[in-house]
Amino acid sequence: MDGALVKAIGIKTLLYGGSALLLFWTFNAVKIVIGARGINPLVKQFFDQIASGRIDAAYRLTTKTYKQHVNRQDFLKFLGSLQLNRYRNLKSGRPRIEGDQIMLTLNLKSEDKKAELPLEFTFTKIEKEWRINRIAKASR
């Protein structure tokens, strides 16, 4: 009788724990999706501006904090060092939320898919609009 009681309590505990974990995971997934809304259009706009040669317009998509640390000349040097014209395909990773910022790794891939450039972006929401707060080459 005691063995059956322990088994019944164990199964119920396992079911409750699994349900709680599933609920927690679903809540966080929804939070990320809702929180990251608007980032994909910003990324597209950023790369479209660069591709069309409007570097100043791309630079304006960054935050005031970014501009305080990276002046226009450094931004141009950074973009030049990336050799973005070698890449055609963009694959986005899963966004990560830390406080009021969202971090996202973007993998740029060449047409032949042999070369890959991972970039780490950090986004901050300023007055209901997302802005780029940090761009860096991601470590592999």
Image (tube, grey):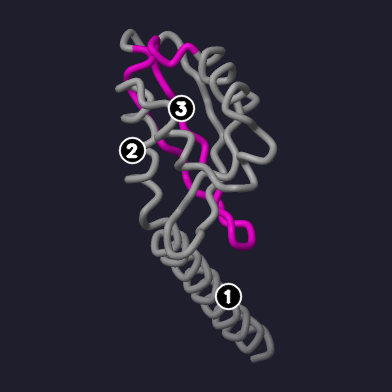
Q: Position of residue 22 (x, y in %)?
A: 48, 69
Residue drawn where x is 69% and y is 89% of the image: 2
State which region is magenta. 83-110
Q: Please indicate whether residue 85 sits to the left or right of residue 18 in the image.
A: left
> Could you say which is closer to the camera, residue 33 or residue 20?
33
> Could you say which is closer to the camera, residue 23 or residue 106?
106
What residue sits right under mark 1 in the picture? 17
Image quadrant assignment for residue 35? bottom left
Query: Which badge, 2 or 1, comes first in the chain's sequence?
Result: 1
Query: Which badge, 1 or 3, comes first in the chain's sequence?
Result: 1
Q: Is residue 134 above or below residue 83?
A: below
Image quadrant assignment for residue 37? bottom left
What residue sits right under mark 2 in the picture? 45
Q: Position of residue 105 (x, y in %)?
A: 52, 36
Residue drawn where x is 46% and y is 27% of the image: 107
Q: Please indicate whether residue 37 sits to the left or right of residue 115 in the image.
A: left
Q: Please indicate whether residue 114 sits to the left or right of residue 5 in the image.
A: left
What residue sits right under mark 3 in the picture? 107
> Could you say which is closer to the camera, residue 115 or residue 77?
77
Residue drawn where x is 40% and y is 34% of the image: 57
Task: Check whether the beta carbons of the residues at disc 2 and disc 3 lie within 8 A of each other.
Answer: no
Callout 1 secondary element: helix
Q: Is residue 103 magenta?
A: yes
Choose mark 1 or mark 3, whichever is in front. Answer: 3
Q: Is residue 60 above or below residue 82?
A: below
Total marks shown come to: 3
